[in-house]
Image (tube, helix red, strand yellow):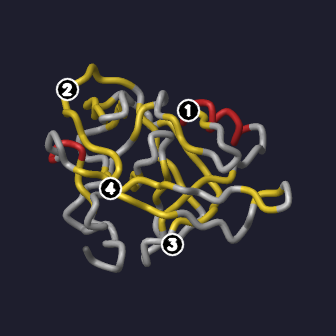
Amino acid sequence: MPDQLELQPDSLAGGYVCGDTKVALLDGHSLSIADLVEHLHRGVRHAIYAIQQDGSVHMTRLLGARRMSHDMEVVEVGLDDGSVVHCTPTQAFLGEDLGWVEARRLQPGEALLTVVHAHLWKSGRVDPDLHADTAAARRVVGVRKSPERAVYSFDVASAHNNLCLASGVFVHD
């Protein structure tokens, strides 16, 4: 396993997630991308997880999320915990080897790097030095076509524009 996170290669076109996609928040809750857009419009910013180039997981902020101007082709990525991620076929997921894989190229049984053992709180407050472990704890069950629908992009206060979903897997914008 490489010891450095692969920067998103030029060969990946970039992808989008659907509004029902749940993002893991540092307070232990999760919100959909669509709800986060609404919060951002009201000036509410949430602390989230992001993975750094060295593979460590840290707290960061979701700076922005926006709905794209038109509906796009969507796939449904099923995971072994029963969760589903609706996204465009070009949405990048973080594999266990710290490399990004487009949703359309994911195979049943493929392991995705997942955040585990997050240390969220210190003295009743969010720990700005948050760190968490990662493991290849989530497996892809399948990828299938889903009806076209609205999709969203996101911006994260991190050198690597990625975030952790409620299922624990990481996606890259």
Tell me where residue 23 appears, x and y as whole percent.
Answer: 54, 41
- Residue 164, position in %: x, y? 49, 51
* Point 24% across, 59% down: residue: 12
Q: Which residue occupies the foreground of this view, 128 or 119?
A: 119
Distance from the alpha carbon under mark 3 to that under mark 1: 23 Å
The residue that disc 4 covers is 136
Q: What amino acid is at disc 1?
A: Ser
Q: Nearer the viewer, mark 1 or mark 4?
A: 4
| Mark 1 or mark 4, earlier in chain | 1
Q: Residue 162: where, in percent of width, then height?
A: 46, 58
Label 2: which secondary element: strand
- What residue is shown with label 1? 32
Q: Are marks 4 and 3 in contact (CB under 8 Å)?
A: no
Amino acid type, callout 4 = Ala
Q: Is residue 102 above or below residue 1?
A: above
Q: CA distance from mark 4 to mark 3?
A: 23 Å
What residue do we see at 33% from left, 45% from top? 138
Residue 108 position by quadrant: top left
Q: Are marks 1 and 2 in contact (CB under 8 Å)?
A: no
Q: Which residue is mark 3?
A: 159
In the rendered image, which residue does mark 2 sit on?
Answer: 145
Residue under the image location 40 percent in, 39 percent down: 17
Q: Secondary structure at mark 4?
A: strand
- Distance between the alpha carbons at the discs numbered 2 and 4: 25 Å
User: Which callout, 2 or 4, points at the residue further toward the start of the chain?
Assistant: 4
Using the numbered discs, state the Cα–Cα distance from disc 2 to disc 3 in whole angstroms.
32 Å
The residue at 76%/44% (across/down) is: 44
- Say which mark, if any, is on residue 147: none
C-alpha gap between disc 1 and disc 2: 21 Å
Classify 33 as above or below 126.
above
